[in-house]
Amino acid sequence: MSDFRFCLGAMALLATAMPAHAQTDPTGPDSVTVRFVGGVPPVCQIGGSTDTRGSFDLGVLIDTQTGLLRRNLAPPQKELGDTWCNAPSEIEISAIELTPQGATAQLRSGFTNAIHYTATASGWTDIAATYRTDGATTQRDAVQTAPDPRVVPLIITASDFRLREGSATRPLASRAYLGAIRVTLRPLP
């Protein structure tokens, strides 16, 4: 029995000595790996400075000799540089016809109170997004998809000015006809 006690005591002494011995005997460098975790949300931004986002100035809309809508209305395009999306995206265009502001005259036969046009957003996709103000509220060609991230200038144009009632109709007098083009650029999920 005393041999057994001796063995147990020796084993206990050896067990307490081992950790101390292991601490003094270097076994090499220690290392840890710290990982980075983060994300980049899908974002789209329509570029351009404030001067490129300004109004299309059409000037006088009618031929002052005839009172009819000018056939040569051609405002310069708006180029919105540094437009980008970091993901696949969708561009959508919509527009509101030009209407007289503050016109008090009664609308009579032969006159109109709306000038229609075609709004176009090009450069973002192979096929331009287009919207006709005298078309349906929802138009198939008004939405186009870009399958890849991109940085390109976006070109906005207004063209094909027309009157729904026909070219022999005259617009009502007003110091200001106002309309608008809205372009929306959104990332796809």
Image (cartoon, helix red, strand yellow):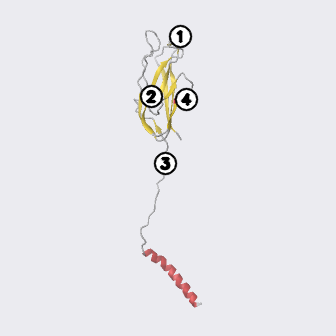
Three-letter amino acid code at the position of disc 2: Ile
The answer for how far apart the CA atoms under marks 2 and 1 are is: 32 Å
Quick check: can you spot residue 88? yes
Amino acid type assigned to the residue bearing label 3 in the image: Gly
Of residues 147 and 113, the one drawn nearer to the viewer in this rendering: 147
Cα distance in 3D space between marks 4 and 2: 18 Å
**Which numbered marker is on residue 110?**
1
Q: Residue furthest right?
A: 1
Q: CA distance from mark 3 to mark 2?
A: 32 Å
The answer to whether the residue labelled 3 contacts the one labelled 2, judged by CB atoms less than 8 Å apart, is no
Residue highlighted by disc 4: 140
Question: Which label sits in the foreground, 4 or 2?
Answer: 4
Residue at position x 50%, y 79% in the image: 16
Along the polypeptide, which appears first: circle 3 or circle 2?
3
Chain-order first, disc 4 or disc 2: 4
Whether residues under marks 4 and 2 lie with C-beta atoms below 8 angstroms apart, the answer is: no
Q: Please tell me whether mark 4 or mark 1 is closer to you in this view.
A: 4
Residue type at tag 4: Arg
Q: Which residue does the numbered mark 2 point to in the structure image?
A: 156
Image quadrant for the N terminus? bottom right
